[in-house]
Amino acid sequence: MPDQSNESRRKFLTKFTKVVAGASVFPSIITAADRKRNLESLKRDIKFSPNDQIQIAVIGAGGMGSADTTTAITVPGVKLVAACDLYDGRLADAKKKWGNDIYTTRDYREILERKDIDAVIIATPDHWHKDISVAAMNKGKSVYCEKPMVHDITEGPAVIAAQKNNNVVFQVGSQGMSSLGNEKARQLLKDGAIGKLNYAEGFWARMSPTGAWQYPIPADASPANVDWNMFVANTQKRPFDATRFFRWRNYRDYGTGVSGDLFVHLFSSLHFVTGSLGPDKIMATGGLRYWKDGREVPDIMLGMFDYPETNIHPAFNLSLRVNFVDGTGGTNYLRMVGSEGSMTVEWDKVTLYRNTANVDASDPLAKNNMDTGKQYVYERKQMLSPEKMEYEAEKGYKGAHFDHFYNLFTAMRTKGKVSEDPTFGYRAAAPALLCNDSYFNNTIMHWDPVNLKIANK
Ligand SMILES: NC(=O)c1ccc[n+]([C@@H]2O[C@H](COP(=O)([O-])OP(=O)(O)OC[C@H]3O[C@@H](n4cnc5c(N)ncnc54)[C@H](O)[C@@H]3O)[C@@H](O)[C@H]2O)c1
């Protein structure tokens, strides 16, 4: 069989040699003007959609909305033109950061009406994700919506349907999804580097007021500069409460607890690496142990999840935990364990631990096989591979956050695929949200990850 890659390489080299030879024979014929014209025509040859410059707006210009915007505009050809927030202080900050000429408003609907905006970043508290996402897609906008994609398990289908009906690009903001680390881990798992997967675990440990969501409340916060009515427009009406507004994660009307906030990242990465659609059994426990500041959600949560066997992976168990009272503070990890080793997965690094031990003849199962003559276990020595291997991103790696936005804008330009579409985002959010149902209702939750439905057992 002819080696096609060699053949095309040979053709490529022959062509290249002719071009170079031609150029060196007639060097003076190519003028500076020709060169400029050639370069310009080369530029025009690149097939971008009419959306060459992508204009974006941020809706929810707080901590993550600002980080998202700052990263998004580092992707070439992307410009911020508007910002929306319910606190005037954040709008003033937005102008300081991104220029006085950006348009600012408290009302997201004004942003969605604008024809000069191609895509919106939605980084509001969780209870607004579904409503603004659906409204934005119905106006033909592409969307980058922060995780968790939805606030309640019932909201996922509306987002999936809006994306399909409007045929727009929708990316959920679990940025680890697009990272080099996740890609490497997926490849290692597929190549059998840890053998047969049977268990995974992840945790987040924190021990600081901000880590535990006690964010500063601006001294000037008042109904005059906070649009409280809009904040509660799609949930229970209450009188103005600055603590609820600025520390929204602590309250169930707006946030999704530690599982919606943090487990969801681990689900996204785990599902990406394993190709899994999700667990079918979800159990959570925990408690409010320390941050008794009026919050409605636990500061320690443990979740256990059963992943059923599929044609892509074996059955395995997952254990996740978040501890906001962890004296070791500031660590998090995701680790996958298989019959031949384990790996810890970070967005820019994967550490693989291989079990290099030989077959142990004292193992009762092996001994039984030998005794019954079923299998002769020959303890021949073997070449050992390193017990620990570290894969690190090259210096200068722009990181998962950049990758995730690059992925979004490339999908918009090429009508291509994003790495975290609404179906994937819902599959990552669902088990995290079901942890809250399990915890608050003291029950085991069953989920059908294929058909995206709560299952009755
Ligand atoms: N991907 C990540 O790593 C990551 C990290 C942090 C937060 N997040 C997500 O980002 C979102 C925002 O979190 P945050 O920490 O930035 O919170 P934040 O409180 O700092 O910012 C939220 C902002 O949204 C504004 N807002 C509230 N309702 C609004 C509405 N209806 N219209 C316009 N603006 C509105 C608030 O005024 C506030 O400025 C959350 O969903 C969170 O889960 C993701």
Image: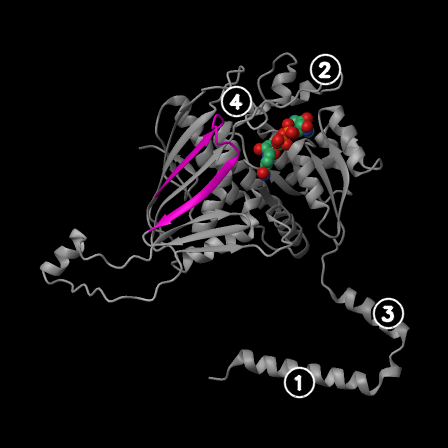
- Earlier sequence position, callout 1 versus callout 3: 1
Residue 275 showing in the rendered view: no
* Neighbour tally class for label 4: few under 14, some 14-19, many 20 plus, Cα within 10 Å: some
- Earlier sequence position, callout 4 versus callout 3: 3
Direction bottom: furthest residue: 25
Number of the label disc, if any, that sits on residue 36: 3
Q: Amino acid at mark 3?
A: Lys
Q: Residue at x 84, y 35 (%)?
A: 100
The C terminus lies in which quarter of the figure? top left
Q: Is residue 250 left or right of residue 203?
A: right
- Earlier sequence position, callout 2 versus callout 4: 2
Where is residue 108? Give x, y as percent: 71, 31
Give me the C-alpha separation between circle 2 and circle 3: 58 Å
Q: Amino acid at mark 4?
A: Arg
Q: Which residue is mark 2?
A: 222
Residue 334 on the magenta segment: yes
Up the image or down, 66 lies above or below 367; here it is: above
Give me the C-alpha separation between circle 1 and circle 3: 26 Å
Query: What secondary structure do most residues of the magenta stretch adopt?
Result: strand
Give me the C-alpha separation between circle 2 and circle 4: 22 Å
Task: Tell me if the residue at label 4 has its CB under 8 Å from ligand 1.
Answer: no
Q: Which residue is mark 1?
A: 14
Q: Amino acid at mark 2?
A: Ser
Where is residue 381? Give x, y as percent: 27, 66
Where is residue 290? Give x, y as percent: 48, 19
Q: Which residue is mark 4?
A: 252
Q: Residue at x 13, y 62 (%)?
A: 374
- The span picked out in magenta is 317-338
Q: Amino acid at mark 1?
A: Thr
Give me the C-alpha separation between circle 4 and circle 1: 66 Å
Secondary structure under tag 2 reads: loop
